[in-house]
């Protein structure tokens, strides 16, 4: 499973980057991006927290 951001849903809140900067990044266009598509398993708790905290549910997990 790998994290993915649904661009149409992202409002650029930045909470995902605050929680897991190893995986997410807010860019100049005001949207968040996944910068680590194959994160280490040790980051899963942070990814799960980012998914839960995203105000628009723009972060999902996809099959690898």
Image (cartoon, rainbow, N blue to C red):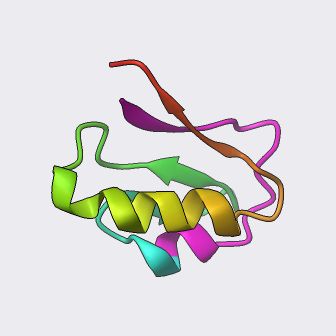
Image quadrant occupied by the C terminus = top left
Image quadrant occupied by the N terminus = top left
Seen from the viewer's position, the closer of residues 56 and 31 is 56
Q: Is residue 22 above or below residue 57?
A: below
The magenta region covers 1-17
Q: Is residue 53 above or below residue 56?
A: below
Identify the residue at horizontal 37%, vertical 65% (top origin). Answer: 45
Q: Residue furthest top?
A: 63
Question: Is residue 18 toward the left or the right of residue 54 in the image?
Answer: left
- Residue 51 visible in the picture: yes
Q: In this view, does 17 lie above or below 57?
A: below
Q: In which quarter of the image is residue 52?
A: bottom right
Identify the residue at horizontal 70%, vertical 62% (top origin). Answer: 30
- Residue 24, how many percent across, how many down? 44, 59
Q: In this view, does 2 lie above or below 54?
A: above
Question: Is residue 9 toward the left or the right of residue 5 in the image?
Answer: right
- Residue 39, how many percent across, how many down? 23, 47
Report the number of numbered marks: 0
Q: Quadrant of residue 15?
A: bottom right
- Residue 26 visible in the picture: no
Question: Is residue 63 toward the left or the right of residue 6 in the image?
Answer: left
Instruction: Please check the rendered image and state whether residue 4 is part of the magenta-colored stretch, yes or no.
Output: yes
Q: Residue furthest bottom?
A: 18
- Residue 40, how many percent across, how many down? 16, 51
Question: Is residue 53 toward the left or the right of residue 38 in the image?
Answer: right
- Residue 20, how many percent across, how many down? 40, 70
Identify the residue at horizontal 73%, vertical 71% (top origin). Answer: 13
Identify the residue at horizontal 60%, vertical 56% (top origin). Answer: 51
Instruction: Please check the rendered image and state whether residue 33 is part of the magenta-colored stretch, yes or no.
Output: no
């Amino acid at each position: 499973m790998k994290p993915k951001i649904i661009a149409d849903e992202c409002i650029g809140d930045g909470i995902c980057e605050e929680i897991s900067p190893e995986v997410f990044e807010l860019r100049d266009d005001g949207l968040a991006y996944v910068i680590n598509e194959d994160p280490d398993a040790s980051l899963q708790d942070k990814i799960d927290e980012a998914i839960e905290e995203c105000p628009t549910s723009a972060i999902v997990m996809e099959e690898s």
